Image (spheres, grey):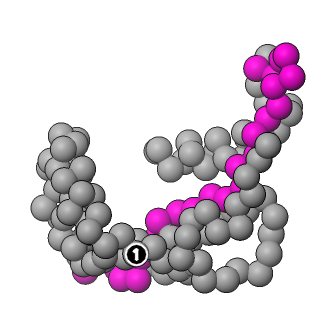
Amino acid sequence: MASVFATLAHAWAGRDNRYPDQLIDGVQPHRVQKLYYATANFVLPDRQPVSPPPITTVIQIGDYLETKIAAFEAHTTQAPVFSMVKKNILARGREEMFHLAATLEPATLTQETDLFAGVREEA
């Protein structure tokens, strides 16, 4: 559900006809420049195969793999499935893969290694 609401927030945030009561005293809607979804280059062996979205961005996470595992372990909501989650995290190795789902300025897709590639700093 977090993904659904984040996607809706991305679509609605930049519109001046949503939540006009918040657009006072010069406040303008913010348009997010990019929206990514996490993806992978494998399917889970105990699930029906799916066709995952194409990988558009690969981030090398290096030594942060252990930090990521520790963060998942710290969430009690993850405890019932943590062994499966940890196995899948380790299967990915030290790379995170993403699919560029939406962009403010459509362009030909290129392979990225930085989620902030092409993002303009706003004044």
Kindly identify the residue that appears in the image at 83 percent across and 17 percent down: 24
Side (left or right) of 68 relative to 29: left
Give coordinates of residue 96: x percent, y percent. Answer: 40, 71
Q: Residue at x 82, y 39 (%)?
A: 15
Question: Residue at left 59%, top 78%?
Answer: 112
Task: Answer whether residue 48 is visible to the viewer in this image.
Answer: no
The dominant secondary structure in magenta is loop
- Residue 94 horizontal/vertical position (percent): 31, 76
Residue 33 occupies which quadrant of the picture? bottom right
Q: Amino acid at mark 1?
A: Gln
In the image: residue 26, left or right of residue 62? right
One can see residue 62 in this view? yes
Dot 1: within a 10 Å radius of its alpha carbon, few (fewer than 14), some, or many (20 or more) residues?
some
Q: Residue 94 versus residue 8: which sits nearer the camera?
A: 94
Front residue of this view, candidates 62 and 36: 62
Q: Residue furthest front?
A: 123
Q: Was residue 26 drawn as part of the magenta stretch in this picture? A: yes
The count of marks equals 1
- Residue 91 colored in magenta in the image: no
**Quarter of the rendering occupied by the C terminus:** top right
SS at circle 1: strand
Q: Which residues are magenta?
A: 22-45
Residue position for label 1: 60
Does residue 20 appear left or right of residue 71 in this picture?
Answer: right
Q: Residue at x 76, y 25 (%)?
A: 19
Q: Is residue 25 left or right of residue 19?
A: right
Instruction: Give coordinates of residue 23: x percent, y percent.
Output: 81, 22
